[in-house]
Amino acid sequence: MKSALFLIILMILIPALPAFAAENPPAGEAGKARIAELYSDIESFDVTLYSEEPEEALTLEVVLVRPEGKGEEVLDRQVFSVDSLPANTRVIKVGFWDIGNAERGSYYLRASLSGEGKLLSESEYGFAYGTRSVSRLRVNDLIPNSEGISVALSPVEAVLFDIEYMLVDGSDVVYTAKTEKVSLTSTPETFSAAWGTLLENNREYLGRVKIQVYSPKREFIASTEPFTARDDAEITDIFEDETGASATVFGRSQVPFEGSLVFTVYELKNGGGEETSGPVESIRERVPVLLNDDDETVEVAWNQRLPKGVYRLEIELFGNDGDVIERRETIIESDLSSDSYVNGEAQGAANESQSPGGENGGGIPGFSIGAGLAGLAAVSVFLGKRS
């Protein structure tokens, strides 16, 4: 009886118990802003901050130290302002050491996070420089641009690893993407990621990759390259005839493309390469805003159909800054005689309104005999009713 009563009470209490989070927060005191992760080599470093509660006006200090005898030598010190640390969001700071000629040996990165004059968290990361140990993976090349980032890797032996891609603006990582459990066996391969955030035209950014190898020991490899974000697009398809033209534009950048297309038609003398004076038509159209992998087709119509002859069509794609990104040329051959159209309308259509004999006959345009008889009949019926 007591056992049954205990089970009933337990079933009542279980729904009221708090559920565990699916992912554990970074190590540290729960709820407090803290340093969650550190990395450094002799050239650069990154520090990951985390908090379950929103924080503001924090200060991060990083120091590069080299042991020297019984003491140590401070080689570089940098301080970063952390204006905002949102709740449950990783904030990563990236920096570069300025130490000149580095010597072989052991080094330490020491980081401390403080707010309102109080130390909130501190951590240390040790690494060696100039050792003969060979990593199982090598970075052959790293190319970031306005679309994304690509890294070429070569394996020394078969290896399994994670790649984290970072877009860095100043010292702030503004976008990250991660690919886990990537493998290389014997041949080099290239790995890429597209930026999932908007870029500002003509702004300097850094593209950074951080690779984690798990065995035989856990180690990191990092590489960083600068680039300037540019608006970019290309013409992928065009169409043209004597009535108008169109061009399909494909976006190739995370800088919003807000350019324009200019369609210009020149008449060629006797079908040759020599042009008559001045353009026959010139039309500028705005291209709808494009991002990477977007495409839009822009269509234009000439003011009037091009008379019989051969024409050169020039299509220019202008970027956000008014620079010509791409130029395409093609030929339009019109078989339409200038006598075939009057005021932009076909003569055949005009002749349809004439009498069968080819003359208007002096009557009211569009007035037929059948319509006249029908009108007389309606009048007779109306007069009959009145009488």
Image: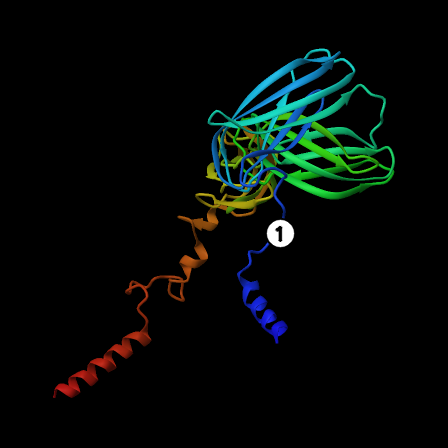
What is the x, y in percent for residue 146? 60, 33
**Which residue is under mark 1?**
22
Residues packed near mark 1 inside 10 Å, few (<14), some (14 to 19) or many (20 plus): few
What is the x, y in percent for residue 220? 74, 31
**Side of 365 relative to 136 (left or right):** left
User: In the displayed structure, would residue 314 be above or below residue 68?
Assistant: below
**Which residue sits at x=60%, y=35%?**
328
Q: Nearer the viewer, residue 94 or 33?
A: 33
Q: Nearer the viewer, residue 291 or 216?
A: 216
Query: In the rendered image, which quarter contains the C terminus?
Result: bottom left
User: In the displayed structure, would residue 19 be above or below residue 159?
Assistant: below
**Side of 44 relative to 372 (left or right):** right
What is the x, y in percent for residue 10? 58, 66
Query: In the rendered image, which quarter contains the N terminus?
Result: bottom right
User: In the displayed structure, would residue 153 be above or below residue 344?
Assistant: above
**Which residue sits at x=78%, y=17%?**
105
